[in-house]
Amino acid sequence: MTNDFRSELYDKLKWLTFFRLLVTAVLLGGVAYIHAEYASSFLTPLLLAVYVLSSGVFVLTIVYSLLLKRITRYSAFATVQIILDTFIVSLMIYLTGGFSSGLSFLY
């Protein structure tokens, strides 16, 4: 792997990490806002699951950021991130209504 390719992949992984954090924050804020307007309680099982999953994504993003400075196999690291992100999005869609979920656009 050439240094140019490694550098480019490193930059893409940094951007992926940034956008994961941004999208998670927007989705979490949107869910909180909608439920503050239309729901009577923030403590429903579904909301707790969404909040825990979103918090987990924030923690995972911090771990990714710390690992990014230490790893050398960027391709494998990118593959792991994409697989985990796909699993997390699938779980979020499942929790919020499956096929009819408002989050299905995340695919």
Image (spheres, rainbow, N blue to C red):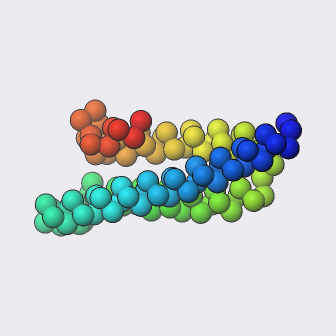
Q: Residue at x 46, y 45 (%)?
A: 88
In the displayed structure, 104 sits above or below 29; it is above
Q: Residue at x 15, y 64 (%)?
A: 37
Q: Position of residue 95 (x, y in %)?
A: 31, 45
Residue 16 visible in the displayed image: yes
Q: Is residue 4 left or right of residue 32?
A: right
Q: Residue at x 57, y 40 (%)?
A: 82
Q: Residue at x 24, y 35 (%)?
A: 100
Which one is in front, 2 or 95?
2
Q: Position of residue 73 (x, y in %)?
A: 78, 44
* Quadrant (top left/top right/bottom left/bottom right) for the N terminus: top right
* Quadrant (top left/top right/bottom left/bottom right) for the C terminus: top left
Q: Residue furthest top?
A: 99
Where, by quadrant of the figure, is residue 78 drawn?
A: top right
- State how many labels appear: 0
In the displayed structure, 85 sits above or below 34; it is above
Residue 73 visible in the displayed image: no
Where, by quadrant of the figure, is residue 101 drawn?
A: top left
Q: Position of residue 19 (x, y in %)?
A: 52, 53
Q: Is residue 9 left or right of residue 35?
A: right
Q: Is residue 25 left or right of residue 103?
A: right
Which one is in front, 93 or 23?
23
Where, by quadrant of the figure, is residue 8 drawn?
A: top right
Q: Position of residue 75 (x, y in %)?
A: 72, 39
Q: Residue furthest right?
A: 2
